[in-house]
């Protein structure tokens, strides 16, 4: 029997679980896969940028990641700001950014080395060591605070320098989520020494024991507080900063701090406590001609604010001492008066994003649709009894996306061009961290097949669709049983014929 061949478009919606669903951070950014760390990577490299940008640095509910832009102002905010100002010299009453703490990324199998804690071993995490020694993953290229942009020494020289400074060091292990931070760190011969050491779990909201210090005076971690080069390149800093004041309150600290370090015995309620949260006022206008680095950090100071972490002679935030920063890219900060800041009534350990009842967003299954069709979005939000503002938005893709009603979880989306799109559903109840989920919609042009029969073979050529393509065969056009013949990336196939009637079809993504 002569064989008949027919090209059939198989346009169907293919369901799959979104690969990104659990890799969206607190700011609604898809993190993607975490690159492997196989050796110690310095912070001021493109490799480090790729790794840290894929990390969820502390849980979405952590205070460092908390959006405080809607929190009320503390009743004595004006008095506290006035106190911060009066404690400083007249020429130091503006914001300033210092290039200070750096870090190194280490692999999971980084060898542990002893480090002697010479001042506060009783408040240090020994992590397998024996007092006064800790066992830390210290690489040979461990950077010390200020290197390289603020010193002229080589790394090896700076590790051993006896110059007086805070000399913080930070080790980050992305594979496990642990960080180790030290203060007054120095290499003496072949032996490491520091004042103290603290270990933090970036997967947890756990604090230091009450009353314990850390590498920072407030008992807080430093790494999550540092505006980094990769963040400013993206134009968005996604966390609070650490800030230094001249004088802090004696005898008390505010969540999430665990330690006070007041230079005097002054217990005035108008002195900021360690952990106190300040915020750049919403009405501060960021000039359009300021640098992208300044804009990114100032927007973060409005949204996430800054936490008082240490005492010093300036009202200062810390950024990494990256030698890739453009010259003078933070200079405009010194024109910002401290009067542009306010102190907020911060949330406690079981309040705000850490309270029960956070919404959960479900964007639905990934989809593959023909270019002339709209995607039927079937999202859902579990608000746990609270009311949330829900919103679909375009995240990435080659064209324009039009939502029938972006505020409805169940709606439609139309696409201006074929390609792969990511759409994100968010749910914001004004109290908890915004819930996010994403789906991938692949928009394909319909497949058109041209068929030619040559002797004992059939040649299929087609246009439209996206690979991989699957060529299938059935004995009848209305069959429910189609057998896969070949899977390929190209848009043509030559197949042998048999002495029976048959039908072919091509499916693509």
Image (tube, grey):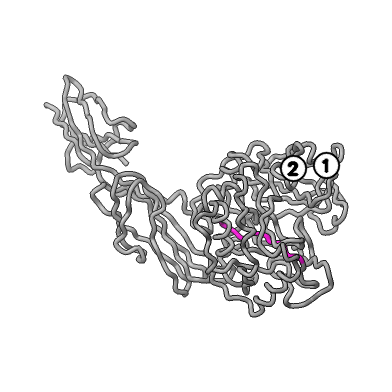
Residue at the image point whose x is 68% and y is 66% from the top: 256
Picture quadrant where residue 43 is located: top right
Q: Which residue is denoted by mark 2 in the rendering?
A: 151
* Mark seen at residue 425: none
- Of residues 273 and 66, which is closer to you in this image? 273
* Mark 2 / mark 1, whichever is N-terminal: 2
Residue at the image point whose x is 44% and y is 70% from the top: 388
Q: How many marks?
A: 2
Please check the rendered image and state whether residue 245 is part of the magenta-colored stretch, yes or no. Answer: yes
Q: Secondary structure at mark 2?
A: loop
Q: Secondary structure at mark 1?
A: loop
Is 367 situated above or below 504?
A: below
Question: Tag 1: Cα neighbours inside 10 Å, few (<14), some, or many (≥20)?
Answer: some
Q: Give yes or no for contact between labels 2 and 1 (Cβ–Cβ under 8 Å).
A: yes
Question: Tag 2: Cα neighbours inside 10 Å, few (<14), some, or many (≥20)?
Answer: few
Residue 17 image position (x, y, % from top left) = 42, 51
Spatial CA distance of label 2 from label 1 is 11 Å
Outermost residue, front direction? 91
- Of residues 215 and 472, which is closer to you in this image? 215
Residue at the image point whose x is 17% and y is 40% from the top: 477
Q: Is residue 15 visible from the viewing direction of this image?
A: no
Q: Is residue 184 left or right of residue 429?
A: right
- Of residues 338 and 267, which is closer to you in this image? 338
Residue 295 image position (x, y, % from top left) = 54, 56
Please check the rendered image and state whether residue 35 is part of the magenta-colored stretch, yes or no. Answer: no
Q: Magenta residues?
A: 238-246
* Mark seen at residue 161: 1
Picture quadrant where residue 487 is located: top left
- Of residues 456 and 191, which is closer to you in this image? 191
Residue 73 image position (x, y, % from top left) = 60, 75
């Amino acid at each position: 029997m002569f064989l008949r061949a027919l090209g059939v478009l198989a346009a169907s919606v293919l369901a799959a679980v979104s690969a990104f669903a659990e890799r969206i951070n607190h700011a609604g950014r898809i993190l993607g896969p975490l690159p492997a760390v196989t050796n110690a990577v310095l912070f001021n490299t493109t490799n480090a940028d790729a790794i840290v940008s894929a990390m969820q640095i502390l849980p979405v509910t952590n205070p460092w990641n908390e959006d405080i832009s809607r929190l009320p102002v503390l009743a004595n905010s004006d008095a506290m700001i006035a106190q911060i100002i009066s404690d400083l010299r007249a020429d130091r009453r503006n914001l300033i950014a210092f290039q200070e703490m750096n870090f190194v990324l280490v692999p999971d199998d980084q060898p542990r080395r002893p480090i002697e804690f010479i001042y506060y071993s009783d408040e240090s995490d020994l992590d397998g060591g024996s007092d006064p020694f800790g066992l830390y993953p210290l690489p040979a290229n461990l950077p010390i605070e200020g290197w390289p942009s603020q010193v002229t020494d080589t790394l090896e020289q700076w590790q051993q320098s006896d110059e007086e400074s805070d000399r913080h060091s930070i080790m980050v292990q992305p594979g496990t989520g642990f960080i180790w931070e030290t203060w007054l760190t120095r290499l003496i011969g072949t032996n490491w020494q520091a004042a103290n050491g603290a270990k933090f779990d970036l997967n947890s909201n756990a604090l230091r024991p009450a009353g314990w210090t850390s590498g920072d005076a407030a008992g807080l971690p430093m790494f999550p507080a540092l505006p980094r080069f990769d963040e400013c390149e993206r134009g968005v800093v996604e966390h609070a900063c650490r800030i230094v004041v001249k004088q802090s309150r004696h005898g008390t600290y505010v969540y999430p701090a665990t330690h006070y370090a007041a230079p005097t015995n002054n217990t005035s309620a108008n002195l900021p406590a360690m952990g106190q949260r300040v915020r750049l006022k919403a009405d501060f206008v960021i000039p359009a001609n300021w640098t992208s680095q300044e804009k990114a950090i100032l927007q973060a100071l409005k949204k996430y604010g800054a936490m008082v972490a240490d005492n010093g002679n300036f009202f200062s935030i810390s950024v990494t001492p990256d030698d890739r920063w453009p010259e003078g890219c933070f200079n405009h900060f010194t024109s910002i008066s401290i009067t542009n800041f306010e102190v907020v009534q911060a949330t406690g350990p079981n309040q705000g994003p850490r309270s029960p009842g956070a919404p959960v967003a479900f964007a639905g299954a990934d989809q593959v649709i023909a270019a002339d069709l709209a995607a039927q979005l079937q999202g859902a939000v579990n608000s746990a009894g609270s009311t949330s503002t829900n919103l679909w938005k375009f995240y990435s893709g080659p064209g324009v996306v039009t939502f029938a009603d972006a505020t409805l979880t169940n709606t439609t989306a139309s696409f201006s061009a074929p390609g792969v799109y990511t759409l994100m559903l968010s749910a914001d109840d004004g109290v908890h961290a915004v819930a996010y989920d994403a789906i991938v919609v692949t928009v394909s042009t319909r497949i058109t097949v041209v068929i030619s029969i040559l002797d004992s073979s059939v040649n299929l050529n087609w246009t439209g669709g996206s690979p991989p393509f699957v060529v299938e065969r059935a004995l009848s056009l209305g069959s429910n049983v189609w057998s896969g013949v070949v899977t390929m990336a190209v848009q043509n196939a030559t197949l042998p014929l048999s002495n029976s009637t048959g039908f072919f079809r091509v499916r693509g993504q």
